[in-house]
Image (cartoon, helix red, strand yellow):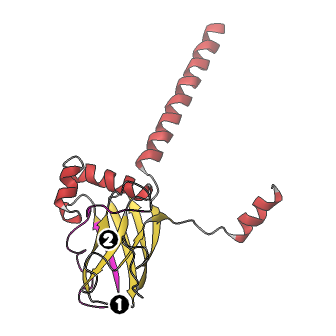
Amino acid sequence: MNAIATRLSKTRALLAVMAAAALFSATAVHAAPINYVTSLSGPNESPPNASPGTGSATLIVDTATHLWTMHVDFTGLLGTTTASHTHAPTAVAGTGTAGVATTTPYFAGFPIGVTSGTYDNTFDMTLATSYNGSYVTANGGTTASAEIALANAIAAGKAYLNIHTSVVSAGEIRGFWTAAVPAQSKSWGAIRNLYH
């Protein structure tokens, strides 16, 4: 009877380890998309400028599906748009400059020749057309390695969205991507406050 109990105990332990491993690998494979936001302005540029232009953008990074979704609104630019892309990585989070990571001179379909506009696109990050070729080369030589490098730069606060114009060719407005903080529901906030 003891031998049977020992075997059952070992079998249960093995099943528990296998279930935990399956759960861990399923979690890693199906990582949830991460939402990022940024506010674009002339003072955010390097060097800063006095542009009255402003903008906001959201980026949903989904490394499981390799589809990244971007929405950009901008207005009040001094010049007309000539380029727009993401630069990465800067040496220090939230400051400095870096080379262009995404397509040049601008994202496919980005409104060019305007002082205000809206942009929506979903990028397939498995395609070379989603990147600047030199960024892929500098980051492992494949789109898979480039996607990892860019996702890491964005997560570390070392990547920024830049809109260049005819008046400020080096970039009229920009903003560093930061993780969006989801709003707490009132019910969760009330429950949480009971325990603090």
Sequence-earlier tag: 1 or 2: 1
The percent coordinates of residue 86 (x first, y second) are 31, 67
**117 in magenta:** yes
Q: Which residue is mark 1?
A: 116
**5 in magenta:** no
Q: Is residue 37 left or right of residue 135?
A: right
Q: How many marks?
A: 2
Seen in the picture, residue 4 relative to 124 is either above or below; the reply is above
Which element carries disc 1, helix, strand or loop? loop
> What span is colored magenta in the figure?
95-123
Residue reaching furthest to the top: 2
The residues bearing labels 1 and 2 have C-alpha atoms spaced at a distance of 20 Å
Q: Quadrant of the N terminus?
A: top right
The percent coordinates of residue 97 (x first, y second) are 33, 63
How many neighbours does mark 1 have within 10 angstroms: few (below 14), some (14-19), or many (20 or more)?
some
Q: Is residue 2 left or right of residue 96?
A: right
Seen in the picture, residue 148 relative to 194 is either above or below; the reply is above
Residue 52 visible to the viewer: yes
Q: Are marks 1 and 2 in contact (CB under 8 Å)?
A: no
Q: Amino acid at mark 2?
A: Thr
Q: Main secondary structure of the magenta part?
A: loop
* Disc number for residue 108: none
* Disc number for residue 122: 2
The one nearer the camera, 50 or 162, is 50
